[in-house]
Amino acid sequence: MVAAESVRVVRCGGSELSFRRAAFSADSKYIFCVSGDFVKVHSTATEECVHILQGHRNLVTGIQLNPNNHLQLYSCSFDGTIKLWDYIDGILIKTFTVGHKLHALFTLACAEDSVFVIINKDKPDVFQLVSVKLPKSSSQEIEAKELSFVLDYINQSPKCIAFGNEGEYVAAVRDFYLSVYFFKKKTTSRFTLSSSKNKKHAKNNFTCVACHPKEDCIATGHKDGKIRLWRNFDDDKKYTYTCLHWHHDMVMDLAFSVTGTSLLSGGRESVLVEWRDATEKNKEFLPRLGATIEHISVSPAGDLFCTSHSDNKIIIIHRNLEASAVIQGLVKDSNIFTGLMIDPRTKALVLNGKPGHLQFYSLQHDKQLYNLDIIQQEYINDYGLIQIELTKAAFGRYGNWLATVEQRQEKETELESQMKLWVYDKKTQGFVLNTKINMPHEDHITALCFCNAEKFENPTLVTASKDGHFKVWILTDDSDIYKKAVGWTCDFVGSYHKYQATNCCFSEDGSLLAVSFEEIVTIWDSETWELKCTFCQRAGNIRHLCFGRLTCSKYLLGATENGILCCWNLLSCALEWSAKLTIRVMEPDPCSENIAAVSQSSAGSDLFVFKPSEPRPLYIQKNISREEVQWGVFVPRDVPESFTSEAYQWLNRSQFYFLTKSQSLLTFSTKSPEEKLTPTSKQLLAEESLPTTPFYFILGKHRQQQDKKINEALESELVQLPLTENIPAISELLHTPAHVLPSASFLCSKFVNSLLLSKETKSGEEILEDVDMEEEKESGDDSDEEHDFTENTQDTNDTELGEDIIHQLSKSEEKELRKFRKVDYSWITVL
């Protein structure tokens, strides 16, 4: 049973992974990245998320390893706290309350009890770099109010702050200014670039800064694509700088290698540039990384780099500039035209991804599965260019078919439109283009839907357009002479008084089609395509349209742009009820009669869950989000929940996800993000911490976790091997230091005996087989067995004083006795 009070709105994924620089562990096994209110710990080898560090109440703005303990991690947030984590176990160690809104975090090995943060003081655009002393205390929550001022008038981005030469100075850039503060001398030097409006100096703005780890050298990136290397900056008059120039657009981030022999740079070209020895001639490239490079990080061991990109991904790169792993989050497209869909095959969330692509996103693992290239054209990153947009998409019932619509309009009279039908290929395990239709309508397509009724074997697709028509497309035999090729063709064209068609949907059984024409809803027979009836309330154009399901299949719901929700009865062809709600999202639950509607108010977005049969809502949740909710979808659960409260039973079979205007993916849940991790993810840290000895490689193959259901089904048939971690001999061999272990001859017998199976584990089927074999051989062995049995009995009776001579058994009695002797009674010991 799940308590009703535990249900809450949670951020389930899709947060921006590239909001801040990622960080590596000291041994380069793990990479840390911010994700909304959480910090995620990923394996660099498998890309698997092994921990989610949760505890902050607002956006996490910085992460840094503890320089005094490499198994610990610092994080800061807009909630005004600095938290210290044990990332191996995912445990919060301490919370330091600073009190100010923290924008970035920095740590230095030379500052043992202090960290550096960027805070906002007085004016909203004035930021300061301050040192925060972290008090030593045994309590878990500590106030850290002792702040020391370091630099003023700085940029809030951590890319504009860098510490150099093992913490001797700190450099900060903003606009056209470079400031350097020396900790020992406690002096500040400032350098200014020309800000004149002529072409030569028009883009001198500083964008990022990086400092050499061992020398007095500062690298700064600029808006014009140049990189400047500053030296002798301890003297305001003798300073010099040299320029490196390859980027045609602004430099987004810079980072020195651990030894300082190389400088890494990245920008909008999606190319990582390595400047070796900081010279113009000696540079290497890693191109085609897919999106703008936002951040660059270097591991403390120096063997790995990583780049954070604008399409919400992190690429882990080896020292030889070869990409080894990609951690892909939910791609943040500028516009989600397709809405939220669920792939019937993979149960993945499907929506707009990279330009011209559909992304398939795993809600359970919070990572992208793959991208499907729909437009199949090279994307040109030009702000003034009008791109082809993927505007509509829909899946067939079983995910065998996918329909997409792409449109481009440069002028009002120049519309380019294509509809593509994709079929799922089992051999390639992907979608293959089947039919391409140029200009399926004369104007923009406003809606499309498949008929997903079970009784219809032949797939049917309906499209609605602003040209005043809806079209019915069916799958037919193509012109192939072998009748093996199939394609889609138009079967019917419908209209209603030249009104624009805005929405369309099929009833659950597929017998009726509802198409809205501005303010009017029309009902059509799906077999004859005859108009059956119309509904009109004159409450504005219909924005959302859907049929009821199961016991409520006789109802049709429509939401208008003027804030009216109408429910019509299809049997009486009359309005059943109406309510005044400004509906932004209306989604039916595929597993029940429930319908979720999200309305927009001045305070935020509100959720209403109801059944069409009665206007009284089953559940109301006010202010589920402060911003506008744009899309929503129900996802059927693999394992139903067991909510007892009537108000929460709508969550038993399905889970409701919704996407906000800032593209935050939220849901109603009882589980924390850490609890959603797969068992494999939770065990990954423990397994990777084992020493890579020869015994580990031999025994590691046996560490396979079997499913409980399979174990229960096969428990009576299979002999269960003991788990290696429960065998004392193996534990002793693996965990005891070699120099204190006894000799191998002493441990050998104990080790071998621990691997032997007990006779008590023999299954019931093996016992029956033995009995059958004995019965087959009893004719030849009866005399010998009788003689042996008699002798054994006589010997036993001789040792027992006071006992009478045993009764002589017959041949049939001996046979029955042999059967009982072979039966395993070891189960009695567990009673």
Image (cartoon, grey):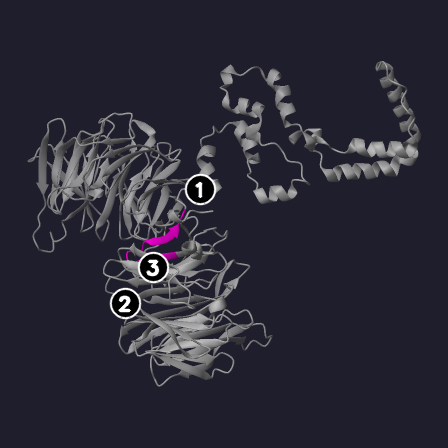
Q: Which of 489 and 436 is in front in this view?
A: 489
Q: What x and y, as percent, mark residue 746? A: 61, 16
Magenta-highlighted residues: 657-670
Q: Is mark 2 on a helix, strand or loop?
A: loop
Q: What x and y, as percent, mark residue 62? A: 26, 40
In the rendered structure, find residue 607 and report the number of the disc placed on it: 3
Picture quarter with the C terminus:
top right
Q: Is mark 1 on a helix, strand or loop?
A: loop
Q: Nearer the viewer, residue 720 or 195?
A: 720
Depth check, mark 1 against mark 3: the one in front is: 3
Give the residue pinned by disc 2.
Answer: 386
Q: Is mark 3 on a helix, strand or loop?
A: strand
Q: Dot 2 surroundings within 10 Å: few (below 14), some, or many (20 or more)?
A: few
70 on left or right of 422: left
Q: What x and y, as percent, mark residue 234? A: 11, 32
Depth check, mark 1 against mark 2: the one in front is: 1
In the rendered structure, which disc, 2 or 3, sits on the residue that comes first in sequence?
A: 2
The kind of residue tagged 1 is Thr
Quadrant in the picture for residue 416: bottom left
In the rendered structure, find residue 653 and report the number of the disc placed on it: none
In the rendered structure, find residue 46 and report the number of the disc placed on it: 1
The kind of residue tagged 3 is Leu
In the rendered structure, which disc, 1 or 2, sits on the residue that comes first in sequence?
A: 1
| Residue 217 visible in the shown view | yes
